Image (cartoon, coloured by chain):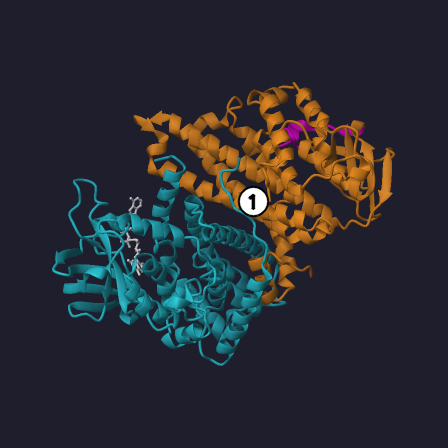
Amino acid sequence: MQRFNFPVIQPDPALEELRGELQRFLKTERDEGNFKPEPECWMASADPEFSKKMGTRGWIGLTWSSQYGGHDKTALERYIVTEETLRAGAPVGAHWIADRQHAPMLLKHGTEEQKLDILPRIAAGECYFAIGLSEPGAGSDLANVNTRAEKVANGWKINGQKIWSSGAHISHYMVALLRTSSADGRNRHVGLSQIMIDLSLPGVTIKPIVDLSGDAHFNEVYFEDVIVSDDCLLGDEGGGWKQVTGELAMERSGPERFLSSYITLETALWQLSGKMGSDSHALLGKLIANLRTLKGMSWAIANLLDQGVSPETEAALVKDLGNRLENDLTLQARAMLNDLPSDQWSPDMRRIMNIGVLRSPPNTLRGGTTEVMRGITARQLGLR
Amino acid sequence: MINTDGMVAETAAKIYTDLCGREVPHQAEAGEYPQALWDALQENGLPLAWVGEANGGFGADYDETFGAIWASAQAASPVPFAETLIANWMLDRAGLAPANGSASFALSGRTPSADIPFGMHADKIVLFDETHQEISLFDNRAAVRSPEEALSPDGMTQFIFSGHLAEQSAKTNLPRRAVEALILTVRAVQMAAAMETALNLSIDYVCQREQFGRPLSKFQAIQQQLAVAASECAAATMAATQAASAIARHTDDPEKAWHEAVIAKVQIGHSVEAVTVPFHQVHGAMGYTQEYDLHHYTRRLWAWRDALGNEYHWSRRLGEELSQQSPDQIWKGVTTGDWVAS
Ligand SMILES: Cc1cc2nc3c(=O)[nH]c(=O)nc-3n(C[C@H](O)[C@H](O)[C@H](O)COP(=O)(O)OP(=O)(O)OC[C@H]3O[C@@H](n4cnc5c(N)ncnc54)[C@H](O)[C@@H]3O)c2cc1C
């Protein structure tokens, strides 16, 4: 018996054809100057025009039914699309979160009317969502959320504040984890619910937060007597904790957990072609071995999820390994570039490397910190 | 795949469970060779798993045989089961009959001597001579036994070729990379299995051992160390599985599995340190004793990561090769496992 289980799935020619289409599109867009590649593009690089182009080509909403504007494809096809856009460092940040997690959430918990209204717009690359989990007093200790939704006639009245909400300034909706009733003594996991909030409603204030590089892609979001209708409660009243932790588990093994900084390595490889010394060979060999292994793990999990199996331990491990690898990719690409005097680096190389270094701290924070992930693993190993 | 449920794997697992309990590796090191274990493996034909029917074997599935190797490494096999499989595979590829008894192997020209893994207990040695494109079988009586220098009980001994005639010999067009691919993959499977077994030992230990009035497992510092080690173990399993699949996929041309096999060696070789350090750390002094079982796995991991070149050697070899290729080709390999030689 093996403790960890990863089926090896052979490449599928149909998927590889899709990969080729993506590669041609991304190359043309880049060559025509429609985007400049960046590391961490799925978080920090949003361009609604680019999202609409992806939507027109049918590369958003791959997994859901055409009845709701989707394309009736599998999660594996979506994986190829995300993998290729990450590799290219394309500006996919606007639609990424809605496509990855809110559309599936609406399919599961939304009303027919919401599905018909919102899902086609997400698939078109026109409608964006923000994640409303963190609050000033609730980071790793997520159950400490304090923003309240109070029951009123035909709906909910929301008061409080979310923080670090990526993309909220360009998003149409936020799905927030809110307290809908008090904690039961020490059990704070009860009384939490997920509610979808239209960010254009009166009482919503969005204030950008500037990051250390001067970019503003996350926000504080304030709610003052914001009224939403009953159907904005997604899932069960009081079931928010279970829903949120379930979703987090699913999204931890995606390619954005280890490929966000691949663009930095690849740009370095183009730069160094024919000029690499033997120390760099050793670094390259190790990075490629790590990447290939993580790809295998992440792909195996994607296939298991597609078959309805949810390998939670393996998924948590992928995020921990992947986040470490992302930092390594930037660091080792820097080391390899020693083979070339820095005044010979292309402008693209300098820009990408600097962005890569500046955007490295969040790798091990967002989506659950490294320490939190290791805590989850430890529980699954039977240590806590 | 590494199929631990197949017939071959289950037979091996049962033999190891019955005849290689936790005391057996200890006894073997004290000089009590578990002949009964070897005999049972042999009676069931397991060392012939990779020998074709034409040569008297049963041409078993690669998947299942890798499952059998997994079971042997979990039991810290004191007999050269994996080595014999490799040696017989080489003989079979050269159209020669399998070794009579246990065997090990060397990849070298007819240099005066070669390091033989598990040479202490191999009856025969199979030599892959790349220069002369020849595979030969030697009797191992002339091995120089140097166990005191070995990292682990299955460690290297030296074989001096001069003055010895091969018992059998045949020309082969098997490329060196094909042989490397198989050996590296077998080592990867063994390492992944040993790592997982040592992880299980560590988890059990910290749940039982109490300090400061609580089991060690309740301390966050311990939990986090083992969580990191677990992630390395999972990655090792993946890397070994990917290499094993490549071997099975390219039966006719094992050279094509070279990249995935090297990747497994590099991935797992580098993580040996990342797991053996925390495993020993959480065991305290107990893990440093001969009496306790941990060293059966950690010493083998230290030996296997060196076998056929260590992780630094293979990282460089892989990087050198890939540096000749375009980033587009490298990406194709990373995403699909479809590599080309340059
Ligand atoms: C770029 C970026 C984008 C983000 N986007 C979003 C978003 O869109 N929506 C959203 O809701 N949130 C978002 N976040 C917030 C993110 O989820 C939190 O940063 C994260 O959960 C950690 O919370 P914190 O920052 O409050 O750190 P804290 O919880 O204060 O932790 C600080 C440090 O202490 C450690 N620590 C905390 N508790 C423990 C413990 N019990 N044991 C050991 N160590 C501990 C943590 O691991 C961390 O290293 C984003 C963050 C970043 C950086």
**A338 or A183, which lies in front?**
A183
A84 to the left or right of B154: left
**A100 or A205, which lies in front?**
A100
Please tell me whether mark 1 sits on a helix, a strand or a loop: helix
Q: Residue at x 23, y 61 (%)?
A: A232
Chain letter belonging to callout 1:
B
Residue B202 image offset from top left, x and y in percent: 45, 32
B240 to the left or right of A4: right
Residue A59, by quadrant, is: bottom left
Residue B172 image offset from top left, x and y in percent: 83, 47
Q: Amino acid at mark 1?
A: Ile
- Magenta-highlighted residues: B142-155
Which chain is displayed in orange in the rendered image? B
Is residue A55 visible in this depiction of the protein? yes
Q: Which residue is mark 1?
A: B268
Residue A46, by quadrant, is: bottom left
Residue B99 image offset from top left, x and y in percent: 79, 32
